[in-house]
Image: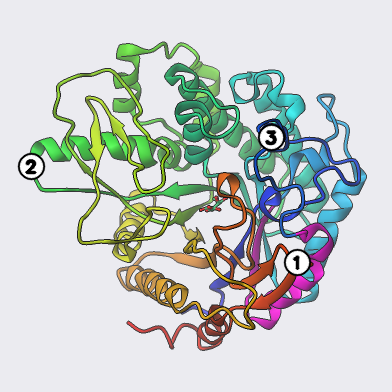
Amino acid sequence: MDKNFLWGGATASYQCEGAWNVDEKQESMWDHYLHLQELENGDIASDHYHRYEEDIRMMKEGGQTSYRFSLSWPRIIKNREGEVNQKGLDFYHKIIDTCHKYDIEPFVTLYHWDLPQYWEETGGWLNLDVCQAFEHFSEVCFKEFSDKIKFWTTFNEPKWFIVNGYFIGNYPPGLQNVQKTMIAAYHVMYASALSVRAFRAGNYPGQIGVVHSYTPVNGVNDSIETKIAMRYADNYCNNWILDTAAKGEFPIDLVAKLSESYDVSFMEEEHLSIIKQNTVDFIGLNYYARTLVKPYTTGETQLIFNHTGKKGESKVVIKGWFEQVKDPNSEFTAWDTEIYPKGLEDGLIEAYERYQLPIFVTENGVGVREDVTVDCVNDDYRISFMNDHINAIMNAQDAGCDIRGYYTWSPFDLYSWKNGCEKRYGLVAVDFDNNQIRKPKKSYYWFKEIIESQAKLIQR
Ligand code: GCO
């Protein structure tokens, strides 16, 4: 492994910081939504806002060389007029300075889902003004932090927050509307390009990318029908984000297909040329699982999302496009996520061939219910999961892919959106019920050895 390869963990502001209304932080759409529904929320989460020093020190002691985290927009910008909250900026200066103190490379996400509620109230991602507001927020951050940051990304996982928020309806704003899903998706990709444009215009040092929830697509067989279903699935799962961010264009067959049933007049020439001219320097891929598909056979062409939302039964079926299936021979987590490291190897090779850009694996990990009252969580399952996925990265490197970093989700236990705090991914256990006590799990020590051996200890 190259000595510049970055090793670390990733978090998101809402999932770890807590301090949801401290130091003039404004309400985010997640604060609002979860408070209203009286669901488990991230008001306190891992209290990283107050414990960041300990968390970053533990990363260092665990041999890690980089920390991927997000900046909370509602912590930094106070209102629709764009007024800046100095206390919010100060907090991130402290995080970044602590990283540097411990020789940890900060890797910044500008948007990890916590839209300010004052923008959600105007229509959120359905409102074109929010794209300009995101551009402004990006500029504030570039100006403030660019002398300390080498790696920026615009959005984390556009697919995940848009599909869940506008199509399935289980994330805020809780809509189930295909036309609105398309508009929100389009606005987010446009906002990403505006942010890249601002980054280039300011001549800031460093590089800027986008982070995608990557699910490489496999088919159940080699038939033509399956190949067609795979193309639909790939457009739906991956291409509309990666093609748009990396090549500057939405897949034309996807737009053509959607325009048969929906209005695509919101796609304006001026936006499309901004998207075309402002592509990213690198791509970040979050990998948890692949998507295995078969053709949809009933002959209906209406676009419908069928997602039970129930644990153990989630799958995507888009009528007339494709149907997601489960491989009966695979192992699945308690949240029904397939464990399939080969998908990472194949997916990296495919993405590198297609985009010819450097790649960071910006998230990879396994969510498990764990008893954190013990001295040291014996998480051999996590060690074996990480070993096999790092091995997949090394295989992709052997095949010629330029992969520059690996971030596990997550360096310490976090709040997990609608799953609350019981779905644990961390290398460090956080006892949410007992003073937020932090204790390294077995995987933390294992990861340290892997990093220090430059992955020579990976079982291949
Ligand atoms: C979880 C997820 C994570 C996060 C992350 C995605 O359950 O917490 O699996 O991957 O949602 O925010 O970027």
Name which of mark 2 and mark 3 comes first in the sequence: 3
The residue at the point 81 percent across, 70 percent down is: 53
Residue located beneath label 3 in the image: 115
- Quadrant of the image occupied by residue 262: top left
Identified by mark 3, the residue type is Leu
Instruction: Work out whether residue 379 or residue 364 is closer to the camera in this orientation and state it.
Output: 379
Residue located beneath label 1 in the image: 436
Contact between marks 3 and 1 (CB within 8 A): the answer is no
For label 1, the SS is loop
Q: Is residue 449 left or right of residue 223?
A: right
Question: Which residue is the extreme one toward the left?
Answer: 223
Q: Give the range drawn in magenta.
A: 47-70
The residue at the point 46 percent across, 73 percent down is: 382
Can you say whether 125 is above or below 286 in the image?
A: above
Q: How crowded is mark 3: few (under 14 residues within 10 Å), some or many (20 or more)?
A: many
Identified by mark 1, the residue type is Gln
Residue located beneath label 2 in the image: 223
